[in-house]
Image (cartoon, coloured by chain):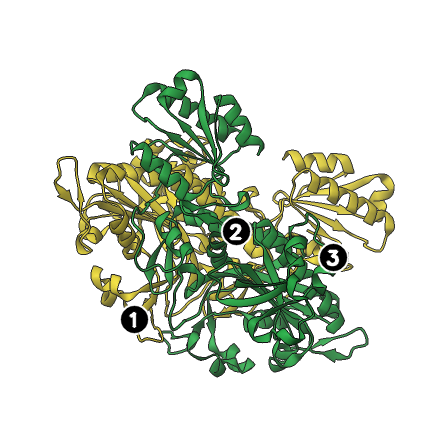
Chain colours: A green, B yellow
Amino acid sequence: MKLSSYFLPILKETPSDASIVSHRLMLRSGMIRQLGSGIYNWLPLGLRILRKVENIVRQEMDKAGAIEILMPTLQPAELWQESGRYEDYGQEMLRIKDRHKRDMLFGPTAEEVVTDIFRNNVKSYKELPINLYNIQWKFRDEIRPRFGVMRGREFLMKDAYSFDMDYESAKASYDNMYVAYLNTFKRLGLTAIPVRADNGAIGGDLSHEFQVLAETGESALYYDVEFEELLKQDTLDVPSLRKLYAAADEKHDAANCPVPADKLRAKRGIEVGHIFNFGDKYTKSMNVLINDKEGKSFHPNMGSYGIGVSRLLGAIIESSHDDAGIIWPQSVTPFKVGIINLKANDADCTKVCDEMYIALEKAGIEVLYDDTDNSAGSKFASMDLIGLPWQIAVGPRGVKAGTVELKNRKTGLKEEVSVESAIKSVCSL
Amino acid sequence: MKLSSYFLPILKETPSDASIVSHRLMLRSGMIRQLGSGIYNWLPLGLRILRKVENIVRQEMDKAGAIEILMPTLQPAELWQESGRYEDYGQEMLRIKDRHKRDMLFGPTAEEVVTDIFRNNVKSYKELPINLYNIQWKFRDEIRPRFGVMRGREFLMKDAYSFDMDYESAKASYDNMYVAYLNTFKRLGLTAIPVRADNGAIGGDLSHEFQVLAETGESALYYDVEFEELLKQDTLDVPSLRKLYAAADEKHDAANCPVPADKLRAKRGIEVGHIFNFGDKYTKSMNVLINDKEGKSFHPNMGSYGIGVSRLLGAIIESSHDDAGIIWPQSVTPFKVGIINLKANDADCTKVCDEMYIALEKAGIEVLYDDTDNSAGSKFASMDLIGLPWQIAVGPRGVKAGTVELKNRKTGLKEEVSVESAIKSVCSL
């Protein structure tokens, strides 16, 4: 992509209305713009990253055997009245009346809708277990939206719902999602600690929140330091991970903690996922019955599994940035490399840049090519700000010597190398 | 995909509430389910096709140089009050109040939002022309939703918006979209006639509706038969196409028609796209000013370009089906081939099917493999219903003779061929 034909409105000043670093950087790098309170436009750069994050989430769901559907943003109130949640949900639910005065709502979640799909279309125990997921915009009318996409009102969520015959089978479905979540966050370059959470009146230990470590996190948590090592391994050792201690502040009891003080970490976290078994709560209230092998009817056991897809972008930035800007992990970077033409009105520089651009695109590498006539200083600053893993700067002096400058955004290391060597490095790393 | 681990609820009976063939077939083939009036759940098969259609639309927009963004579903009322459309839009606009009693709406279109993005982020004439598009769910509160996704309330729309310095440049942007639309519909296997339409008080001929020919279309149209031939050509002859006559019923004047009667066709059409130049209507009312080279300020000239993405699925089915079901064009088919195991409890049949499934997937072919223990008759009927271009049926007799039955869904032609030959045919066609 040539910057001259892209739409990347960089802000030089720090926006005054953004109190945390990810919000500031997303605004400054032209990823998002606020449309209304807690509602954001996704500009080209932000959308590109959102789609990459979304696709990793999707791939891991598919790999785990979940099946993608798409439920509408608007839902009829009747289903929520049936489950008993319509009144309970409170003011975070955006309630709407259509032209015929029918009560509707903008879905904050979709247990009722997916349960309705299930009861209308699944007839036999043979079709179980089944896990249906969707990635769709949700709305929660937060009283005080803040932190940009971290606590917005309209946000992109992946929500999956499992249906099983009994608790044993439901536990296997749950464990399957637990592993899928660990794999997802790992691929996104995040250290996400699974913290046991409350699952209401149902009991059992089938509820975990996944917390990305970040100083700006909203929750305080305590966890066994071994998590950090185990989560880094190429092959995740799930049984060992499941045994480790992690608890949110309000659940942590220092006096009775099983982890010795020198192995206990106290950090802050950003919740990016929540998995949860709630038994027959909805299948009972919404009267879903399936016959088993013997013809005896039962209410299927359900679990739900959420990931805040748009929120993840904030979480990734919170955990991966420096003073100059964002540092994208390879897996979700909008472009792998940026080419900076330091003198766009110099025919030799432009020739080298153009050829490199064509060669890299041909090799299937995503390139952002700054071919504008902005100043060198502003080009360097913008490229650092948007945080692509690699930068190649092309200036008149280097071109004469047959070299370009290859920079690793994360380490800051720069080297003068030949054009061929720069291309080779970017392709192979 | 193995059918036993998929979610494809086929309906044997014809749904009584569906009056047109595409609606019936989408329900029967398990593509969609109604959630509320004019609001549909997309089940796995339907979603898969929706994404393919969406991607073709996206690719042709990208190829034409438009840049993708994503605007939220909910919009603040203020922008519409500014443009003057808030009261005018009438009851089709779904008006919403949030918990703080602020007026919002579910976007039926996005001229105001994109104009607001433009005025806040584009500062110089040097950034023009620019075309921003998004593919997002819209809501129009139709008084009587019907025909399934053809006239739903929540629907997926691609909407693009061009900004230019003057009319001449805007005309070039418009022509660029005209060609992109022809290419898009061609790739989707559709004959879409561009019909000149009204563009309000602005004048000029910069407004076309693209009408897919179908008996069930809502509009009557008259057009030069040459359209049909020209639209079939590999390379579209745009200047010739632009000269041809086409008019909607209410505009057609038989007495003064420039096309001789024997070259005039009268057919019905489904509107799937609309392109439109509206000059400075929004940039003026919303006070958008840019300075030109000489420092003189001007209101940019805008156009908007819509495609009903979810509606296209209905239009494709209306124009491509037979008594047995849907016939998907190759470009959007959910799977290229279906394997039918006629005797799933026969080890030899299953072995042949399994091997063929693995070989085809390895070759990058999308396969739906019916490995269930349903009856042969019901498997054949389902496969015809969902309309994949190819079917391979594997039965005990054939397996003994070393053959399978390869069927072309469109022509109905069947041949007994070897497994290798069936694979080869499917891969190469």
Q: Which residue is mark 2?
A: A53
Closest to the camera, between mark 3 and mark 2, is 2
Q: Could you say which disc has been placed on residue A397 in the image?
A: none
Q: Where does residue A335 sit, x and y in percent of width and height?
A: 47, 39
Q: Amino acid at mark 1?
A: Asp
Question: Do the residues at discs 1 and 2 belong to one chain?
Answer: no
Q: Where does residue A5 sit, x and y in percent of width and height?
A: 34, 36
Q: CA distance from mark 3 to mark 2?
A: 43 Å
Q: Is residue B269 visible?
A: no
Q: Amino acid at mark 2?
A: Val
Count of marks placed on residues = 3
Say what secondary structure mark 1 lies in: strand
Location of the C terminus of chain A (image quadrant): top right
Closest to the camera, between mark 1 and mark 2, is 2
Along the line of sight, which residue is nearer the eye, B233 or B99? B99
Q: Amino acid at mark 3?
A: Gly
The subunit carrying tag 3 is B
Q: Which residue is mark 3?
A: B377
Q: CA distance from mark 1 to mark 3?
A: 56 Å
Q: Residue at x 32, y 37 (%)?
A: A378
Q: Which residue is mark 1?
A: B103
The subunit carrying tag 2 is A
Say what secondary structure mark 2 lies in: helix
